[in-house]
């Protein structure tokens, strides 16, 4: 029997190195493209939420007054901007003063916390761990990351606002553009899914804004009763950060507890208790009540989504994990589960 010819080609070592390096560079490039694409998609999602808010206001105004759609849209957009400007004008100076005072008092508050902790053996160990070189390096890195992320978010806001306004003014144009990408046989189904996505996002956003308002009011009342200074700034921070599930309330509680510690350790404990009670009420009673007709997403899924998305997209991953899960859940239910 004749020997079988071996057609496999043996590459030299330098060629193998170049091939391996090329494959690695391609993988890195694809990952970077995926990260950039996902970040852009989250900005588009944020713009869509802005549009859902404006369209919701416009629809409510149109049902109550019978005015034209264009007039109601104009009033909803301009009215929202005017209200924000008025709030900033009426409360901005006071909030800015309280935030500046809060920033100035934080170093002394931290020093006082160290003094309180150093009075016990356990507290001394905690202080040693926190003030170690390794911990300080990690804390500095974390602060720098948060600083960059915050300014990155602020830089993205104008893009989101314009996307939201464009989506608000002519939503059918963008919906039809997406539907046209679907084969003709599935366009009716795609249109129905788009409508369902919009309805679910509107319900979620309505419930979230209501929950943020309730958290702001309850926190304000509690801090005023306790006699906590800078209560308005602290309550405003709590209300705004409540938009971020799981991590937002914890971040908002830190400066409030530190301010309470300026008065006494027991005051700091009471402040922490106030924030925990408010979050229990919000998570177990307020949000479930206002979002009872919305798709139920387990809290663990939200945390997992935040942990997976945040390393890729930064702060926006934490903020928009829940509406992203709402979209994914609707798509899975309509495209897969309903066919089972």
Image (cartoon, helix red, strand yellow):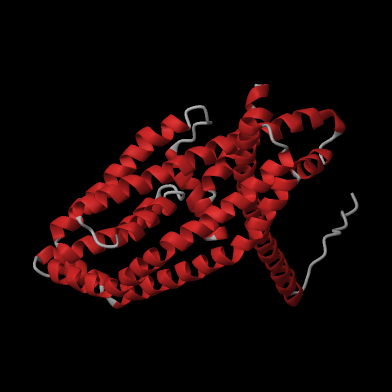
Which quarter of the rendered picture does the C terminus lie within? top right
The mark total stands at 0
Residue 19 figure quarter: bottom right
Q: In the orientation shown, which residue stands out farthest toward the right?
A: 2
Task: Name the one closer to the observer, 27 or 63.
Answer: 63
Q: In terms of depth relative to the viewer, which is nearer, 41 or 253?
A: 253
x, y percentage for residue 15?
A: 76, 74
Query: Residue visible at 36% across and 67% down?
Result: 99
Residue that extends furthest to the top in the rendered view of this protein: 340
Percent from the top left, x then y, of residue 134? 33, 74
Looking at the image, residue 180 lies above or below residue 260:
above
Q: Nearer the viewer, residue 138 or 315?
A: 315
Q: Position of residue 54 (x, y in %)?
A: 62, 45
328 left or right of 30 in image: left
Q: Is residue 118 above or below residue 228?
A: below
Q: Is residue 199 visible?
A: yes
- In this picture, residue 50 sits left or right of residue 257: right
Can you say whether 46 is above or below 10 in the image?
A: above
- Horizontal relation, residue 127 to residue 42: left or right: left
In front of the other: 125 or 57: 57
Is residue 331 something one can see in this rendering? Answer: no
Residue at 54%, 56% in the rendered image: 316
Percent of width and height locating residue 33: 69, 61
């Amino acid at each position: 029997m004749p020997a079988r010819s071996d057609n496999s080609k043996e590459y030299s070592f330098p060629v193998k190195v170049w091939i391996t390096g090329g494959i690695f560079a391609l993988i890195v490039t694809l990952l970077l493209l995926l990260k950039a694409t996902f970040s852009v998609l989250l900005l588009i999602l944020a713009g869509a939420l802005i549009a859902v808010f404006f369209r919701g206001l416009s629809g409510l105004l149109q049902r109550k007054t019978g005015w034209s759609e264009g007039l109601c849209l104009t009033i909803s957009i301009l009215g929202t901007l005017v209200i924000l400007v008025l709030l900033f004008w009426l409360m901005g100076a006071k909030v800015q003063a309280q935030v500046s005072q809060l920033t100035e008092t934080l170093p002394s508050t931290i020093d006082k916390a160290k003094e309180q902790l150093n009075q016990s053996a356990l507290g001394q160990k905690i202080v040693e761990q926190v003030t170690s070189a390794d911990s300080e390096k990690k804390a500095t890195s974390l602060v720098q990351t948060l600083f960059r992320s915050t300014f990155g978010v602020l830089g993205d806001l104008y893009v989101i606002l314009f996307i939201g306004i464009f989506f608000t003014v002519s939503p059918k144009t963008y919906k039809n553009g997406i539907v046209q990408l679907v084969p003709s046989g599935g366009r009716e189904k795609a249109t129905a899914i788009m409508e369902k996505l919009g309805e679910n996002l509107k319900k979620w956003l309505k419930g979230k804004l209501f929950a943020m308002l309730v958290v702001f009011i309850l926190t304000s009342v509690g801090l005023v009763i306790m006699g906590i200074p800078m209560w308005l700034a602290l309550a405003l921070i709590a209300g705004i950060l409540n938009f971020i599930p799981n991590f937002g309330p914890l971040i908002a509680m830190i400066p409030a507890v530190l301010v309470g510690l300026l008065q006494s350790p027991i005051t700091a404990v009471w402040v922490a208790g106030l924030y925990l009670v408010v979050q229990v009420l919000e998570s177990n009673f307020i949000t479930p009540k206002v979002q009872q007709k919305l798709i139920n997403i387990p809290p663990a899924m939200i945390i997992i989504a935040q942990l997976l998305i945040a390393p890729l997209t930064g702060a926006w991953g934490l903020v928009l994990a829940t509406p992203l899960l709402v979209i994914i859940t609707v798509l899975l239910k309509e495209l897969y589960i309903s066919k089972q």
